[in-house]
Amino acid sequence: MKFIFHFAGVLCLLVAQRAYAQEHDLKQLLDLAMKNDFSIQSAQLEELKTNARISEVKSALLPSLNVSGDYKRYFKIPGQVVPASAFGGPEGQYSTLAFGLPYNLSTTAQVTQALYNPSVKYALKAANLNRELTSLSTVKTKEDVAYNVTDAYYNLVTVVQQMSFLDSNLISLDRLLKVSNLLYQNKLGQRVDVDRILINKTTTETQLATLKDNYNQLVNLLKYYTGTPQSDSMRILVNVRGVTLPGGADWDRTRRTDVALLQKQKDINELQDKNIRSGLIPTVNAYGVANMAFYAKAGENSTFQDVPGYWAGLQLNWNVFDGMARKAKRSQNQIDREKLDVQLRQVKESILMEESNARNKFGVEQKNINAKKDQVALAEKVYKQIQLQFKEGTVSLTDVIQAENSLLDAQSNYLTSLVQLLKAELEWKKATGQLINE
């Protein structure tokens, strides 16, 4: 199915804000938005942050080095209670002895290396999956921006077309007003006829002013999406061609980014469950310690002694019982998995509904648009004929106003069908995951 239409000529005059402003079509607007939109920039920064998190997780695989120091100045050295017999005293009696020197300095360096920790392995896998998830989130953000830019552009297309219709109607009303004034001045018409035309002209001018304001708002919205300063001029080239839907009904629904996001979240959920279960497995770390202690005493019998110490070891950590915390975590994780399954089914059904609605809507409007375009042409022809007859005095102003209303209705119906056609194509692209995969 294919429908082609093209707006040019008068539209270039309507969309030009300043002669030197750069002209942008829809593709150029989308390219600018992909580079400059604030939400896309934020999503890309989140990707960089995720990469930094992966480096943080990888650091758990490398040895860690901790250095600590401790200085003590004892004003009274703490004592210890020992049996007096240990120093030749009587049995059953105890003495309080103070060991050590008043100045103590200790420096310790410890290197630790994880030898076996399954939690680190799962954390690294989860970090990589999170990187893919963040990348998909960026794609989803780009799709949302592409949808918003295209939607704003299509709204601008219809506003410009409606402005073109109203400009044409104003030209006809000006001509009709001149004829009515001439007839009234020559005593061949009534003042009320002139007033009724003036009312219609004022109404049309008010509608045109409202549309121009809507146009400016849409241009400002496109500036926002494309990262263009609001103070800069932007000229929009309104040129829509080749509104089509693919003929085949088969397409890969997994290409939808929201489906891929849910699938990736399910993969992460599975890794989280494995990580929780790995808490039952003991972890093993190797470590080495270098310690240097210094003891000193000031005064007449001053002394300074250093006492080095070095050792290495293996450390086993095994959380045998955690108060059923792991079981509770796995239960929560299972509920999250079931929620993801429900969300995935919901999204898939939503996709089928969106695809069907967009296809049906496009088919209807594609059939209607040509007929409504012909109705506009016919209404314009009738309106011009009635105007000529009014000049000749063979019809009344009521007939002219009825023909004008018929023309306005035909134009409105055409614009409604045009909007629906464009929106149906946009919804189809969204449903089939083709917003940024042209």
Image (tube, grey):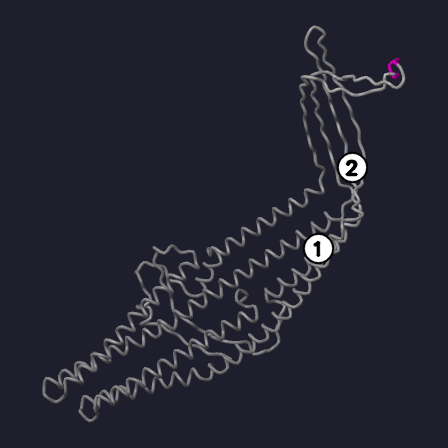
Residue indicated by mark 1 = 272
Q: Main secondary structure of the magenta part?
A: helix
Instruction: Tell me the residue at 76%/45% (across/down).
Output: 117
Q: Is residue 30 left or right of residue 410?
A: right
Q: Residue furthest top?
A: 300
Q: x, y (%) of residue 335?
A: 69, 62
Q: Secondary structure at mark 1?
A: helix
Residue 206, above or below 116: below
Q: Looking at this view, is 346 or 228 the one in front? A: 346
Q: Residue furthest left?
A: 186
Quarter-of-image position of residue 219: bottom left
Per the image, is 126 magenta? no
Binning the other alpha carbons within 10 Å of mark 1 as few (below 14), some (14 to 19) or many (20 upward) gives many
Q: x, y (%) of residue 370?
A: 42, 83
Residue indicated by mark 2 = 286
Q: Is residue 314 left or right of residue 238?
A: right
Which amino acid, by three-letter code, is at mark 1?
A: Gln
Quarter-of-image position of residue 187: bottom left
Residue 88, above or below 176: above
Q: x, y (%) of residue 309?
A: 78, 24
The range drawn in magenta is 85-89
Q: x, y (%) of residue 74?
A: 68, 18
Instruction: Tell me the residue at 64%/54% (across/down).
Output: 130
Q: CA distance from mark 2 to mark 1?
A: 26 Å
Q: Is residue 209 left or right of residue 179?
A: right
Which amino acid, by three-letter code, is at mark 2?
A: Ala
Q: Name which of mark 2 and mark 1 comes first in the sequence.
A: 1
Q: Which-is-in-front pick, marks 2 and 1?
A: 1
